[in-house]
Image (tube, rainbow, N blue to C red):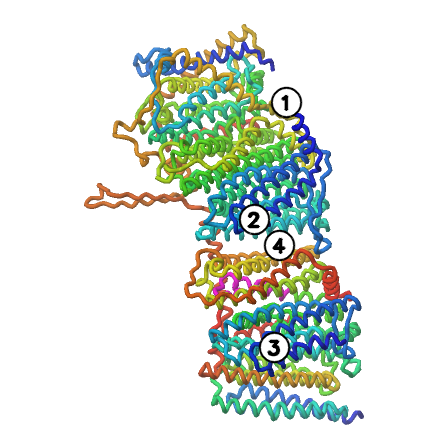
Amino acid sequence: MNLDFSILLAQTALLLVLAPLLSGLIKNWKAKLQNRRGPRVWQPYFDLLKFLRKDMVLSEHSSWIFSVTPYVLFLTALAAGLLLPLVTAQAPLGLFGGVLALVGLLALGRFFLALSGLDPASAFGGMGSSREMIISAVAEPAMMLAIFTVAIAAGSTNLSQIVLASQGPGWKFFDPSRALAFTAMFIVLLAETGRIPVDNPATHLELTMIHEAMLLEYSGRYLALIEWGVAIKQLVLMALLVNIFFPIGLAPETTPATFALGLLCLAAKLLVLAGAVVLVETSNAKLRLFRVPDLLSAAFILAMLALVSTFLFS
Amino acid sequence: MPLLALLILVPAAAGLACLLVRSRRLLPALGVLAFSATLGLGIALVRQVLARGVVTEWNGFLFADALSAWMVLVISAVSLASSIYAVGYFRRDLADGTVTERRFREFYVLTPLFGASMFLVVLANNLGVIWFAVEATALSSVLLVALYNRRTSLEAAWKYIILGSLGLALALMGTVFVYAAACKNNTQSLTSFNWTYLMGVAGQLDPRLLKLAFVFALIGYGTKAGLAPMHTWLPDAHSEAPAPTSATLSGVSLKIALYALLRFSILTTACLGTPYSQHLLLGFGLLSMCVATPFILVQTNMKRLFAYHSLEHIGIICVGLGLSVPLALFGAVLHIGYHALVKSTIFFAAGNIHQRCHTLQLPKLAGLLKTMPASSILLALAVIGIAGLPPFGIFLTEFGIVAGGMGAGRVLVSVLFIAALVTVFSGLLSHVAHLLLGAPTQEALGPRTPLSCVAAMALLIALLAVLSLWLPAPLLELLRRAAALIGGSP
Amino acid sequence: MSDLEAWAHIATSVPPATLLGAALCGYGLGAVGGLFCMRQEKLAAAFSFGAATLSALSGLLAGLLMLGGGAGTPAPQLELLPALIPSLRFTVRLDALSALFLLVVSLLGVAISIYSLGYAKSFFGRKNAGLLGAFYNALLLATTLTFVADNIWMFLFAWELMALTAYCLVSFEHEKPETRQAGVLFFIMSHIDAGCLILGFLLLFQASGDYSFASLHGVGAAMSPGKRDAAFVLFLLGFGIKCGIVPLHIWLPVAHPVAPSNVSALMSGLLIKTGIYGLTRVCFDFLGAPPLWWGVTILAAGTISAVLGVLYALMEHDLKRLLAYHSIENIGIILMGLGAALIFLHTGHPLLAALGLIAGMYHTINHACFKGLLFLGAGAVLHATHTRNMEEMGGLAKRMPQTACYFLLGAVAISALPPLNGFVSEWLTYQTLLQGFGTTDSLWRLAFPWSGAMLALTGALAAACFVKAFGITFLAQPRSPAAGAAHEAGPWMRAGMAVLAAACVLLGLFPALFIRLLDPLTQQLSGVQLSSQLSLNHGLVLGLPAEKAGSVSTLGLVLTGVCLLPIPLALRLVFARKARTRRGPTWACGQAGLTPQMEYTATGFSKPIRMIFKALFRPRRDVQREYDFSPYFATNIRFESHIEEVFVERLYRPLRITILRGSRRIRALQAGSIHAYLLYIFVALLLLLVFAL
Amino acid sequence: MNPPTAETASNLITLLASFMLVLQLLMAVQSMLVSNIRLFALQSLLLAGIAAVVGYAYSACHVYLVALLTFVGKVVFLPWLLERLVRQLKIEQEIRPFVNVPGSMLLCGALTVLAYVVAHPVTSLERLGSNTLAVALALLLTGFFLMINRRKAITQVLALLTMENGVMLAAIALTSYGMPLVVEIGIFFDLVTAVMVLGILVYRIRESFDSMDTSKLNQLKG
């Protein structure tokens, strides 16, 4: 594995730049669908910049965990991104971990974020972290089964191998197990990134926000780091989904040409997925908290069917 | 030097001496002296038996082989310990008037006689004399049970004597049948009734008669040994008797009747050749263990709890003897010794608790570890021993019996054995844990336990601990010979 | 540096047998010493726990040397005591499996003994610390003997001794009635499993004819299938009770919390491992080629134990009961690895069986470390706040900073989050389950991914549970004056925790090194050495034997994190140089200020799970409301919610009631009338006369 | 021993043995204590007679001694002792037994049949008197049943003594001259001490309990 730093730096930069753009894009499109003009697409950059410059207020009750969490969240999201074959089939740090390591890193970030929600002794943070942990717990089996389906087809949990295996002859997408797995992963994506049916990202209403509640006490550069980390996490998950199930444009080896082509294909795919997410967000209302497990158990059933269908129909 | 005769005459003489001696202080000393003498004689007997295989005196009337030598040792050890214990025990009883002067003397006359008749049972060669000796143990111990002259102890004594005499009548019928089978080839003399002669001529005896004889002996001596369903007198007698007597009763006298039954079983196996008697012993042993379990689980009286536990251990020994596999037999014979030591300690402790807290009701007693640390710790060690937990030897013997059983392919027997053991353990543990641990509830406490009582218990526990980890070579050889004897190969 | 090499030379030259002997004598000496100088508490505690530390160290060395020596080293045998009965001998033997578990017991022994040197101070004046030291040493002695026993008799001897000493320790503070009941329940369950083991081993003895373990290797082949399955069921029951597999687990959450904290750490880190050791020794070593249903049963038992263990743990707000339930969960994960390995042995894949074994064993070591660490942390917290109820804690991170760090490290490890050891062993378990799918084509292969999904659910719920445990205990404001006045644990206690924390980190970052130690074990049990194929890039990365299979390197992830750290720091330098930070009150919707009552509670935190899994918990809540004139203006509200222990309510309590009621009915047989007694004898005589002649 | 006297001796023994069984059945029915004691005395007399006949038939002097001992002990001394006890404790009437009269008669009959069935394969061993072993077993079993059936302590002792008679009859019938003398004396001596100890106990029970009804002795339960 030649750890040539060029790809590493490129992918890191790509992750840092694309993430806010993607979330800005989604906010903008959502506004347009609700025939509002909505914030401009690169508004998140300005937000980040503003947060970085502002003074910071730390709660008097919080401990050192409150200050460590932004760095942990940001770094784990970035590291997870580097495990992913973003542009070409070669993931920069593919040797350091496969899909299990990626899920583990995101879980580590979530663990510290939940702790920081409890730290400032406010009820909102406690409620947010409790709901966040429980929803991700219920989503976990569905995600694991979908990953198992894909990993069994490829015979390994190494993401590059999975992508190369699914690039095989014939248009793999219509294979029933991959379609079911994709649907299950899509539902899990909505739950993990806190989209509408599970959690409302745009609200500050105490009772309905899950993810936002944990960030309530953050301000200044810590808030910037966390916002950026969450955006990177969203990009990583969407890219993971897109690259595994639609491996078009992911060349086996990385040269400047294949890098550019891959980037284009990635952008296209991400836009399509973002559009799908926006469509789901605008057409659905937020589910009651105790209906969310039913949605996620539906995802689990879909993943189970995907797994069964790998050997039932082949 | 008539060793066997001395073994019987010394305690008998001590009993008569206690009758005549005036001063009250001398009686305990006489008791302790008598039984330490018998212990010495017992050790000498063991050495002789190991040297010469079999010791006989009075031209064959008295007879001692490995099994009887081991029983002599057990009897003298337990009797010595209970006589030491009785010194302190009765001083307190006399002090608070529960025992009158006459009863005190009565105890010191009857206990040595009780010991003497027990020695006669194990040393007699003639089956008729064995019956006579067992009857003597019954008669001498019935008045001991009724020592306190309370209503309940009288009732216990009455049941003890009626059921005992009934059992012995049936045992006599069994002995008559054996004798009838023996003198069929009309040799007509005292020796034809000796066990050695019978073993010699066992082949020609009429098998049908011997089966009938064994059935009567089993019911008869089984009643005296406390096998279920003939055990009903056992909890009453052992819980109402004074502590030293119930220790001797529970520790040794049950095994004396079992010894007599064992002689019959060996004879029947030699004659019939089929394991007829062993199957019966096995069946009654398992029945005793299963019958003891429910009574232990829901028991409220401490002494009755330990009495039922003796019933279970008699069942264990019977199962061991019934399996008649070398390892199981060795386990059973060794178990006789270990159980005698532990059960006596437990009844001594019960006696201490009874005298200190004036009640035997388990719900009323709690937190004894704080009020009576010395005897509580010794009771805890004894209960650990009797429950068959590792540091002490009973774990070895119970494992030996089960291993023997499984080795011989008796899977169902072993499963029942283990199930009964575990259930009884849980009952015993929950009672004793409630008894010893927690905050003490007793307010009006009697006088502190005298030193001699604690010394007796400590002596027995120390002996058990030593014997659990290291058996001296001569003792091991003696036990191996006794086990071989029961197994049928002389 | 030269003396370091000298020390290393000395250490490797001493044969493992003498080290093991030294360890056993050390424990014995510690126990006897603790008993004798019971009067002077300080001396007794120092002597006994000091002796325990040293003997544990020598045990650790013995284990390391034995495992380090590679697969070939011969297993030394030792005769401890002269045999009472010729066939039942007290012999011990140190083969690969025993060496691994000796390693685990010694590692935990060192850490907890150091911790106890400080912890015993809390007993001075109140209880007898010398006695605690004595029983502690006896328990370590018995557990070590159990792992290294070489014949049936010695194993059962040590097993019962372990149960006895553990009972004495569990009911050490026997003033409280709940401690006594817990002790009795523990001992009865231990005795039941000892009974099952005796029967199981003797079934093997029937076939082998000899008690020594040497003669029992692969004895299953010589037994009839019916007997083999019966032996397996007996062993599963016996070892299952000690492991805490779900239907048999009821003693575990009751016994661990009442014991002194250093003992609960030892019990949950170690006592449970004796069950795992037993199952491994019997299923892989003695019973020969397993049928399919054995592996599937263990896999299913593991899965169910894992999920139910973590679900019940989430509902607990008693810190030590929570950790006890987590022991059940982690045992489930270990059993998943072992069950999968058994299935691979059946389908004839020794390579994957070795992988499953490595996953199970590695998680055993990891669980011993982080569970021990968490219990020691809980002990420190309990020592400081004098309560086990999490609802009365809070804000301890500022008052007990180092304990908080150690507890957090343990929490991250147990939630299987990278880069620590929990993640590595769960990664190995996932890989085993993943590879398992392709091995058979019968429907059973669905069991693997399904267990994988349940493992994921367990991991995530464990993370949620430890966010609750750490957050409610250490973060935010103290909820009670006791928590407010808490002080940091003593130096010894922190040192004990530091040892285990270091172990967790090392086991997490350098897995390839430690898996090399498991080589002799997998060679002995499944005939394959796997560590060389597992460790790629000279030990930095842990990969699977198949060439393009997945790999993970926790060290790599940490390095990546460190390399990426300059980015946020640079952002701070570039943009936020002038920004100031200040401390302000937490947002309370504009009202005056936050009081501790407003904080989120542990019961609240686990409320969503209680709602989602209503069918399992059947939660009941009652609210008492006191008011003066109108119910709408309550002066005082008392809220109480509790869940139903399904197994205790439905299975064990009815069983106990029927047994006791039956016994009372039988007790009526002894009705006191002599005529009835005579009738019993008469009937017995008649029956014998009619049938037995 | 010439055949004719053997012939008449075994007939005589069979006759006396059957009479003993009849007396036993009478005792099962009789409810007066004193008459029960007299019935027992008569039964012991018959036993002594059988012993004398055996002694004469085999002209063995030690059997005469056994007959004499039985006569002195069981016909004279024990009934006198029991009657003195009955007079002292002023208990006259046996209260209603557990099983009424026809029931107990039926049971005794059944037990006798069982005794014959059990004794049948073994009768070939007898020398004098045909199936006296069956009669002995019947005496034993009916004595046992009598002991269960009656409530008064004295009657239970009496039932025990009749069982003893049954055993003695078996001893005499099965063996040519009964058991060796020393054993006979030992057994006899035990019997006497047993009755004396029972007497002491009955006296003490009478003192503390006001009545001799054994069914009152049931405090020790469970």
Q: Chain of mark 4?
A: B
Task: Measure how far apart labels 1 and 3 are at the Cα level.
Answer: 83 Å
The numbered dot on residue B391 is 4
Q: Which residue is mark 1?
A: C536
Q: Chain of mark 2?
A: C
Residue B162 appears in the figure? no
Task: Measure how far apart labels 2 and 3 are at the Cα level.
Answer: 49 Å
The numbered dot on residue A133 is none
Say if labels 4 and 1 share a chain: no
**Residue B127 sits inside the magenta stretch:** no
Q: Which residue is mark 3?
A: B138
Q: Which residue is farthest left?
A: C629
Say which of A18 and B29 sits in front.
B29
The numbered dot on residue C34 is 2
Say if labels 2 and 4 share a chain: no
Q: Relative to B45, is C18 above or below?
A: above
- Of pointers 3 and 4, the one earlier in the residue sequence: 3
Q: Amino acid at mark 1?
A: Leu
Residue C354: give x, y in percent of width and height.
Answer: 65, 33
- Residue B15, located in which quarter of the rendered image? bottom right
- Of pointers 1 and 2, the one earlier in the residue sequence: 2
Residue B474 appears in the figure? yes
Residue A274: give x, y in percent of width and height.
Answer: 41, 16
Camera-near label (2 vs 3) is 2
**Residue B296 sits inside the magenta stretch:** yes
Say which of C244 and C273 sits in front.
C273
